[in-house]
Image (spheres, helix red, strand yellow):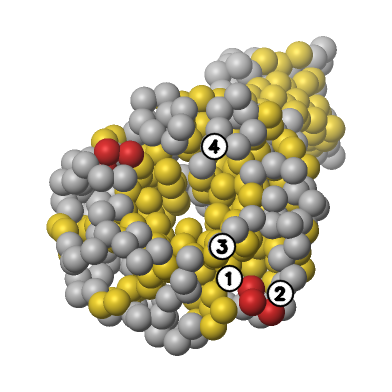
Amino acid sequence: MMKKIFKIIFALGLAISITGCKKDSTRSNGSTLTISNLHYDPSTVTIKQTSTTITIYGTIDFVNASGGVAKFRLTTSTGSDLTMAVPSNSLTSGTLSGTFQVVFPATAGTFTFQLWIIDNGGNSSNKLQGSVQAVIDDSGTGWSVISQSWPLFRVVWTNQTFMAVGDGGTMLYSTDGLTWTQVNAGTSVMLYGLTWSGTQYVVVGAANTILSSPDGITWTSRYSGGGSIGFYSVAWSGTGYVAVGQDNTNSKTVIFNSPDGITWTNNGFAVTGGNLNTVIWANHQYVAVGKVLGAPLILTSPNGLDWTNRSSTVNMGMGIELNDITWTGSQYAAVGFGITATSPDGVTWIVNDKISWGATGVVWSGNRLMASGISGIFSSADGINWTKTFDSPYPLRSITWSGMQYISVGFISPIIMTSPP
């Protein structure tokens, strides 16, 4: 997968003009070339994956230019040093106007610049400084449809790439969230989950399906054991993999372990009547969520081998099922049908069972939690109180965040959506 690299570039545009009145070609004794009154707009810009270039308009006043202004010079906090000739003139005082074309990096921050002028006598002016604040829109209030071609169950941002899987062995990847490429996974079963270890991808799905690939393009089947197992999610801890789901033959949860993504063994731990929808590795442990006999199910493990049922000691109220879970850096946040729950440690949970919408996926942007649902997109600062930010006409199944862009996908009505639009 190719990694997209962004850098900041300041360039003086061609739209330069000078207005003024003094036309003396010599400077009076004791005078100094001086610039002042720097004005520019905008000073704050929102970074978008689709357009990281913005035009900044600016003006400065100048006095005591010997023979007129000859050059305009600009340096930036990223190391750029640009000089551009000013159209022929003889004004000693006036106003200089111009534009900057700015390409921002894919991170928020403050980027500064200094500018000054040089007159036809070779004299340099004082320097003026400006700054542009680059911000990222993670509000999730505006969305646009990218495609309605593939029924997708899960989307993730990993290895600087969006990857999505779904019905009929569908597998896609995109580096920008806009253009998607389909991959032949070598299977036609439903694919539910995927992870990246740093050296390989692992994808899991229905009918005992576990696949691995070093590049996301060429895939190899790694498990096709007996029974009827649906693997719904897979996670990498840094030392091993855990895949979770349901043993459909015996109607119980299933957990498989692998040290390398190639050889897989049944853990043996199971909850009768249950299934596990998602497993993550975060805060030094695995946490898996799902349902058992019509109630939410939460399991934790420090190593993927030894598991503890945490929901058996937590009042889950009227909650029905947990579909997804994420880690914010300070707490776990799990969402599902009729319930959201948070925990600092995976043991003690705060539950909101008054949720009237069905949550299917959740992701942390670094600033807020964003959840996909049957009826739209919802936002939360604490994982307990939620506000709908987008009313989707399509049921959504999964959501991910790249650091500057959300992607959400749907299964029942094939859809890929992005925010900001």
Among numbered discs 4 and 2, the one appearing first in the sequence: 2
Judging by the rendered image, the residue that carries numbered circle 2 is: 314
Amino acid type, label 4: Leu
Judging by the rendered image, the residue that carries numbered circle 4 is: 396
Amino acid type, label 2: Val
Compared across the picture, whether 293 is left or right of 264 comes to right
Mark 3 Cα within 10 Å, few/some/many (few <14, many 20+)?
Answer: few
- Image quadrant occupied by the C terminus: top right
Among numbered discs 1 and 3, the one appearing first in the sequence: 3
Q: Residue at x 68, y 32 (%)?
A: 390
Return the residue nearer the eye: 408 or 20.
408
Tell me which corner region of the image, top left, top right, bottom left or bottom right, holds residue 262. Answer: bottom left
The x, y position of residue 337, in whole percent, is 64, 50
Mark 4 Cα within 10 Å, few/some/many (few <14, many 20+)?
Answer: many
Compared across the picture, whether 401 is left or right of 58 comes to left
Judging by the rendered image, the residue that carries numbered circle 1 is: 298
- CB contact under 8 Å: marks 4 and 2: no
Judging by the rendered image, the residue that carries numbered circle 3 is: 293
Amino acid type, label 1: Ile
Among numbered discs 3 and 4, the one appearing first in the sequence: 3
Among numbered discs 1 and 4, the one appearing first in the sequence: 1
Q: Nearer the viewer, mark 4 or mark 2?
A: 2
Return the residue nearer the eye: 270 or 260.
270
Q: Nearer the viewer, mark 1 or mark 3?
A: 3
- CB contact under 8 Å: marks 1 and 3: no
Label for residue 408? none
The x, y position of residue 26, in whole percent, is 74, 24
Vertical side of 286 occupied by 184: above or below: above
- CB contact under 8 Å: marks 2 and 3: no
Mark yes or no: residue 134 visible. Answer: no
Return the residue nearer the eye: 325 or 337.
337
